[in-house]
Amino acid sequence: MYQQYPASAPVSQEPARFGPPRSVFRAIQFMYAGAVAEVVALIVDLIFAGSLRSDIKKQNPHYTSLQLSHAEDARIAFLVIVTLVAAGLWLWMARANGKGRSWARTVSSVLFGVGLLDLVVQIATVDTPATLTFDWVIALIGLVAIVLLFRKESGPFYRQPLARRP
């Protein structure tokens, strides 16, 4: 009676992947902070919603009370929707960059550019200093995240082959 020779474990054909370097990990943390900052900015906007009514009235002096109320409600609904989309984009980019998706760095950069354009529009149109302060903070968070994503040590993480889904 012979004992069978133990079969060796199957050799994986995929090269081992390594986790995100410190620069990407920090960028992901900043992206989470960006999502939180978006929500905090919405809360600040809602706190100052009273000034929104007076701003709408200044821009549209012919509005009736009902039209003014509808315009204010529409603006608040718009702010909530935009904030949810923005926070969702921050979270999506954090997850995609954490997985080493090379397209995520590009998309993150494009979204940062869109955010900068929004900041320019906000500077030209918003009277509330608190809102502008949060817009600047969000832009700076985005800038730091982008710089971290494109640091020299981040590159190899994005160039390695992607893991296959089981």
Image: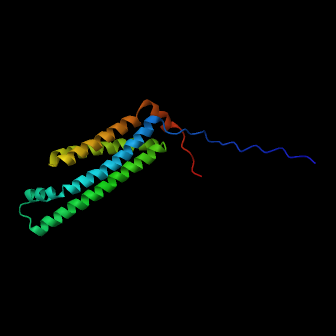
Quarter where residue 138 is shown = top left
Q: Position of residue 83 (x, y in %)?
A: 30, 54
- Side of 94 where 128 appears, left or right: left
Q: Position of residue 127 (x, y in %)?
A: 14, 48
Q: Of 6 and 22, which appears nearest the observer?
A: 22
Q: Is residue 90 left or right of residue 46?
A: right
x, y percent for residue 133: 22, 44
Rendered residue at 57%/47% (across/down): 164
Q: Nearer the viewer, residue 111 or 32?
A: 32
Residue positioned most to the right: 1
Residue at horizontal 40 percent and vertical 47 percent from the top: 93
Residue drawn 76% across the image and 43% down it: 8
> Is residue 121 visible to the viewer in this orientation of the structure?
no
As drawn, is 39 to the left or to the right of 96? Answer: left
Q: Quadrant of residue 110?
A: top left
- At horizontal 22% and vertical 54% (from top left) the residue drawn is 45
Where residue 12 appears, x then y in whole percent?
A: 66, 43
